Amino acid sequence: MNDRPDNAAEGVSRRERLREQLIHDVKTVAREHIEAQGVDGLTLAGVARRLGVSPPALYRYFNGRQGLVRAVYDDLTAELVRTIEQAAQRQDSDDIAAQIHAATRAVLTWTMANSAGFSLLMGAHYPAIAEAEEGIPTVISQSLGNLFGEFFVRFADSGQLKYPEDDEIPPALVPQLKLYRDSVKPGVPLGVAYMMIYCWRQIYGILCMAIYKHLSFAFDDPEPLYENMIVDLLAHLGVEPSTNLR
């Protein structure tokens, strides 16, 4: 009699492992498809055929094609955030400037290694899934905004960060900036949110230029231009770039 609960538990554990493996395999195949062909043409039926299982088996775990795309989207977001966090954690815990520098550099490193992922998260494929999947429009902004927001809050609290007072921010920008601030990092001074979006618009511009190869006839290697941008941004924030990045 004592063996039966153990055997049952072992059976449940095995079923759970098989379930987790199937979900992992489905998302892996879906990501490979997206990287090779983009989002167009991705279907649960096509993924099922690749894996040799029936489509109904996948519908237990994913709410159709869009649910699968959302799962891949969430995994890519988590992967990008993890890459940035690890880069920052390698720096001295007291050197906020070095953490921002390393974290920003990590965004380019991940993007260049995952061009299709970038396109899905915030590039050419983003508008289609943002319209079709509720909640997508704020996922990447909240994830990255909260992560970098922590650096900026600590920076502001240390007294090192230079940021404008509310009345120094262009009035036409204030309503949009408040919406952005309340979505990505509620409670921070509006001037800090302004500095966050000021930096991101520079970062995003070079990321797009690199991925979509705009001006690649001259800037075939985006890293020097990106590094120059980081140095300029740190100067705008009021600090010198770190010379001891790890």
Image: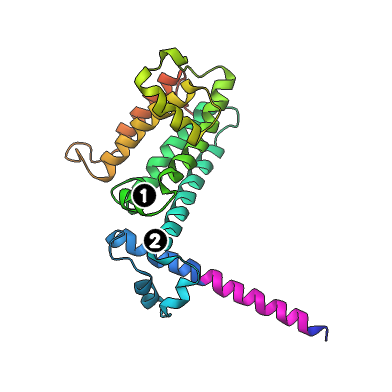
Of residues 56 and 89, the one nearer the viewer is 56
> Where does residue 66 sit, x and y in percent of width and height?
39, 61
Q: Amino acid at mark 1?
A: Ala
What is the secondary structure assignment of the residue under circle 2? helix
Residue found 48% across the figure and 22% down from its top = 190
- Vertical arrangement, residue 64 with respect to residue 213, above or below: below
Residue found 55% across the figure and 69% down from its top = 20
Q: Amino acid at mark 2?
A: Gln
How far is disc 2 from disc 1 in space, using C-alphas? 11 Å
Determine if the magenta segment contains residue 5.
Answer: yes
> Where does residue 110 sit, x and y in percent of width and height?
40, 46
Residue found 44% across the figure and 77% down from its top = 56
Pointer 2 residue: 66
Mark yes or no: residue 196 visible: yes
Left or right placement of residue 43 versus residue 71 in this view: left
Pointer 1 residue: 130
Quarter assignment of residue 72: bottom left
Quarter assignment of residue 47: bottom left
Work out which residue is located at the far bottom of the displayed protein and give it. Answer: 1
Please provide the residue range marked out in magenta: 4-21
Left or right placement of residue 39 versus residue 164 in this view: left
Of residues 71 and 63, the one nearer the viewer is 63
> Where does residue 177 sit, x and y in percent of width and height?
42, 27
- Vertical arrangement, residue 152 with respect to residue 37, above or below: above
Q: Characterize the magenta stretch by its predominant secondary structure.
A: helix
Left or right placement of residue 106 versus residue 118 in this view: right
- Vertical arrangement, residue 145 with respect to residue 127, above or below: above
Asked which colour scheme the image uses, the reply is rainbow
Q: Residues within 10 Å of mark 2 (few under 14, many from 20)?
A: some
Mark yes or no: residue 114 visible: no
Left or right placement of residue 158 versus residue 202 in this view: right
Work out which residue is located at the far right of the displayed protein and give it. Answer: 2
